[in-house]
Amino acid sequence: MSLGSYHQPVLKNRRTLLERAEKFISDIYFTDCNLRGRLYGDSCPLENLEFFLSPKRIPFTEASNQTFAPYKVGDSFGPTWYTCWFRVALTVPASWSHKEVHLLWESDGEAMVWRDGQPVQGLTKEGEKTSYVLSEALQDEEPHSVQLYIEVACNGLFGAGQGSMIAAPDPKRMFSVQRAELIVFHRDVQELLTDFEMMLDIVKELGENDQRSFQALFAVNEMVNLCEPLDPGTFPRARGLASAFLSQRNGQSQHTVHAMGHCHIDSAWLWPYEETIRKCGRSWVTVVRLMEKNPQFVFTCSQAQQFQWVKSWYPGLYSQIQDFVKKGQFVPVGGTWVEMDGNLPSGESMVRQFLEGQRFFNKEFGNYCKEFWLPDTFGYSAQLPQIMQGSGISNFLTQKLSWNLVNTFPHSTFFWEGLDGSKVLTHFPPGNSYEMKGKVEDLVKTVRNNKDKGRVNHSALLFGFGDGGGGPTQLMLDRLQRVPDTDGLPRVRMSTPDALFSQLWSDSQLLCTWSGELFLELHNGTYTTQAQIKRGNRQCETLLHDVEVASSLAMCRDPSFQYPAEKLQELWRLLLLNQFHDVIPGSCIELVVDDALRYYEDIRDSGSKLLNSALNILGSRGSSPAVFNSLPWERQEVVQVQNGSCNLALVQVPSVGVSPVKSTEPQTPVSVTVQDDGTVLMENGILKTVINKDGTLASLCLVSSGREALLDGSKGNQFVLFDDVPLYWDAWDVMDYHLQTRKPVVEVVDAARVVCSDRLRATVSFSLRVSERSTITQEIIMDAMCPYLKFNTRVQWEESHKFLKVEFPVRVHSPNATYEIQFGHVQRPTHRNTSWDWARFEVWGHKWADLSEHNFGVALLNDCKYGYSVYRNTMTLSLLRAPKAPDANADMGTLQFTYAIMPHAGCFQDSSVIQCAYNLNSPLRLVQCPPETVAWSGFSVSSPAVVLETIKQAEDQPRTLLLRLYEAHGSTVSAALNSTLPVSEAWHCDLLERKDPIRPAKLTAQGIVLHFKPFEIVSLLLVL
Ligand SMILES: [Zn+2]
C-alpha cells in the first residue's frame, strides 16, 4: 500500500525530523505557533466563585446549606485533610454556540463536581483530569447559566507526604485553585495531537533497528509539512496520513493485548479510610462518564468493601454502576472483601475474604467473580490456590513479583500449584504495572517482557490512574483505539478478565507450573512493622473464632439463643478491612493506624460481649468456676481462676467443651531454685532450664531424652538489635545488609529473680536496657505439665530505625526450617546456597516455626508475631521495628507480646507443636457453671493430623452449622468427626458454603468419617 507522496527531507537526519515533530506538539516549546497551542480557543471567567471550608468530610446536602464566602483564584485554603467546598456560578457566552465548552479547573487536591445535588465528575490534576465538559456542541436551547459545587479534598492523590511521597503527612500543607474558567475546546486539535503522539511514540519505541520506525518517522514528518495549526482545514490530510500508516496490518502471528481499564484504589494508605470512600466516588463517577461516551470501554473494579461504601455514600452513582455492570462494561473482579495482604491473614480470614466478597458480588450483581485479583500485595501464600478453587475461582491476576529485588520471576502466564496440589491459571500483566496509560511504550513493553513467548500469545494491559487519579482518561482510550491492529505493534482489544483467561486456558498446553508460595523478595519488614496492628489482628481472629464456636454450641443447647449472625458479619468485615494490603502490613500513615486500632477495639468490645452471652448459656449461669475450651483437642493447662498471684489451678477440659475447675495435682510439680552462681534452675518434669542473671537461657533440656536444646556455649533468649535503614520504603523494607549490624542487648537493669514459685507455676522476671530510652521487661514462665517455656514480654520502645529480635541458637542441624502458614506449613532453607535461598533472609510465618532433625527439634511459638528467620542453627523471631515513614510514630510506646520455646522429641507433627501453638494463642476462657456440672465436649476429631478450625452457623441457614477442618501434618489420612450435638444430616460444601448435592457425609457409629489429602481443607454443613 502506498502512503502517498512525501516532501523529500533535505537531509538524511533522523534526529532533526523526530525533534521537529516533537516540538510541533510540545506543551513547553513554541506553543505560540505549534499545534498544542491551538488546543483551547476563547476563554471566559466564571461569573462567581465562593467557598466554604470544613474540617470534616460532610455530605453534599450539609455542605450546600453552609454560608459561602467569595474566593479569588490563587487564594490558599487548607490545611491538610480539610475539605474546601466551592460554589461556582457560570454563564456560557451566547457566541459560543455549537462549540465544545469545558469548565477548566486546575487545583491542588482531589475534586468532585456536583450538579443538581449529584456527583458528576472527578477532577484531579495528578490524574490528568482538569476539564468538566459542559457541552460537546452547545445548543441554543441548552442552559447557558449553570450552578455547580466543587468539593476539593485537601490531600493529593498520594496524601500529603512532607518532602517525599511516603514521608509522614505534612499537617499544615495549604492548597489553592490555580485556574478556573470556561474555555472553548478544539476537539479536532486534540484528535490530531493524539495522532502525532502515537506516530512519534512508534518512531521512538520501535527504534533505529526497525523499519516501521522509519516509516512512521517519514509519515509524521509529512504530517508536520501538511498541517497548518491556524487552519483546521489542513487537519484532515494530516490525519489521513496517520490513519493510513496505523491501518497497515500485522501478520497472523502477532501478540494480542487485552486492554482493561482499572483504578487501583488502596482502601487506606497515605490517607485514611474515610478519604478512600471519596476516592472511589470521584474515580468511579469519572469512569461512568467515560462509559457513556465509549460503549466499548471496559473497566475492572475490585474490593467488595469499596462497592459497599459507594452504595451507602453515593446511591445515585451506585445505581448507574449497576446499569453498566449489566452491560458488561463495569466488571466487578477479585472475589474478596478487600485486596488483602497475601501473607499475614489466617487461613480462616482468607476464606472469609472470599466468603464476604463473593457473596456480596453475587447478591449485588448476580455473579460470582471468576478470578482473584490482587495486583499489589507483598507475597502470596502457598495455600491461596486451594482457597481460590474452594471459592469458585480458577484464575489469578497479580504482578507484584516484578518488584523482586534479587531474582527475576521466570513466568508471566503459568499454573500456580498450591500446598495441596490445587492449581490456578495465573497471569502477571507483562508490562509490570497496573497503572498503564495506553501508550505505545506500554504496548511494546507488554510484548517484550512476556516471559512466555511462544507459549501464549495473549496478555493483559491494565490502564488508568490509581488511588484517586480517577482511573482511565479519554486520551488513554483514544490512544488504544488508534492501534487495534497496526503492523509492528501488538493487536489491541478492549477486553475482560473472562475473555483473557478463556483464551489463556485454551492455549495452556505449553504452560509451566510454579509450585509453592510466591515469595516477594522485598517489603519483608511488613511482617513486623506496626506491632499493635498485628496483635489486634491475631487476637481478634482468635476472639471471633471463639465467639462463633461458643455461639454455635449455645444455639444447640438453648433453642431460644439467637446466633448473632448479623453482628458477627459486621465484626468480621471490620477485621477483613484491616487486612488490606497497606494496613495489616503496617505501611500506612498514623491516621490509618488510629482507625485500625479503634476497629480492633470495637471488635474486642463487641466480641467479648457476644462471647460472654454465649458462655452464659454454656455455663447455665451457675456460680462455680469452669473453663471453656474452643479448640478441638483435650487440654490440660494451668489457669488463673481469680485475680491475684497464686489462684492457680491445673484443669483438664475436653475438646470444644466445658469443664468445671477441679484442680488436679501435676505429675511433677514445678520447682525453681536459685543456684550459687545466681542463675535460676526451673524444672517441671518435661523441661529443665537454667536462666542467667541477664535473662538469657544457659541451658534448656528436654527431660525425657536428656537432650540439651541449646547450642554449646550459646545463650537462648538473646535479644539482639540491628540498624534498620532501608533504601527507600521505610515501613516496608528490611534490607539484607542490616544483618551486618547485629548487637546483643546486654545491659541488665534488674537481674533475673523469682517472682512466683508455686507447684503449678514458676516465674522469673528481669529487665534489660536496650538504649537510653528503651527497655525490655520479661517474665519467663514455666507451667506444670506444659511442654514449652513462655516469655511474656513488655518493651518500652523509643527507637529510630532499629530492629529488635530474639535469638535461640539450637543444637539442631537441618537444611530446612518449617513455618506455619494458612491451614498448613511450608519449608524454607536454613542455608544461603543460591540467590533464591539468600533472598529469603527474613520470612513470614504464623503461630510457630520449627527446626527439626530426625527425632528431635525445637519450635518457636508466638502470640502476635509474623517475622522469622532461621539461618543455620539460629532461630530468630522478629519483634519490633522503628521506621519513620509513612508513620513518624510507628511502634513507639509500650508494646506487649508473648513467645515460647518448645524442644521436642520426634517430629513436630507427633509432638503436638501445632496444638501447643494454638493453645498459646487461645487461652481457656473462664465460665460460671452450676457446681454439679460434669465436663462435656461438643466435638472431637479422632486424628491429631486434622484440625477442626471453624464452627459457625451456616450463612442463610439458621439451623445448620458450618464446620471447617484441615489436614495439618502434610499426610493422607482418614479421621472421624464426632459430635454430641443432634446432627440429622451432613453434607460436603465449598468455601462459599454451597452444598455439594452429590457428596453427603455419612453419619456412622464412628462419627463422620472424612478422608484428607495433605493440607486439604474440608467444609461440612451439619443440619441440626
Ligand atoms: Zn495497593
Image: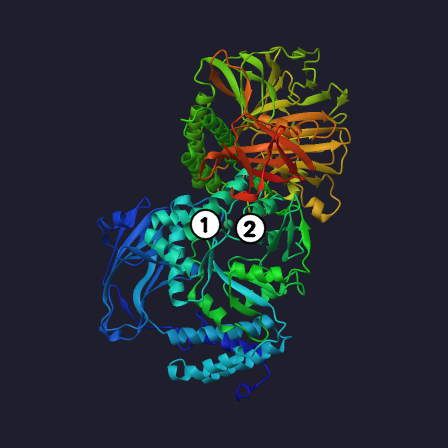
Instruction: Give the residue drawn at x 47%, y 13%.
Output: 930
| Residue 245, horizontal then vertical, whole percent | 53, 80
Quadrant position of residue 325: bottom left
748 lies above or below 118: above
Q: On residue 393, which mark appears? A: 2
Q: Is residue 732 visible?
A: no
Local crowd at mark 2 within 10 Å, few (<14), some, or many (≥20)? many
Q: Mark 2 is on which residue type?
A: Ile
Which is nearer the eye, 38 or 464? 464
- Say few, some or many: other residues with alpha carbon within 10 Å of mark 1 (under 14 / 14 to 19 / 20 or more): few
**Residue 14: where, in percent of width, then height?**
58, 79
- How are the colours assigned in the image? rainbow
Q: Considering depth in this image, is 895 or 937 the residue closer to the camera?
A: 937
Please state which amino acid type lies under the numbered disc 1.
Asn
Instruction: Name the element at disc 2.
Output: loop
Residue pointed to by mark 1: 362
Between 577 and 869, the one nearer to me in the picture: 577
Count of numbered circles in the view: 2
Res 467 visible: yes
**Quadrant where the N terminus is found in the figure:** bottom right
| Relative to 980, 366 lies left or right | left
Quadrant hosting residue 974: top right
Q: Is residue 234 left or right of residue 682?
A: left
- The location of residue 394, given as percent across then percent down, is 58, 52
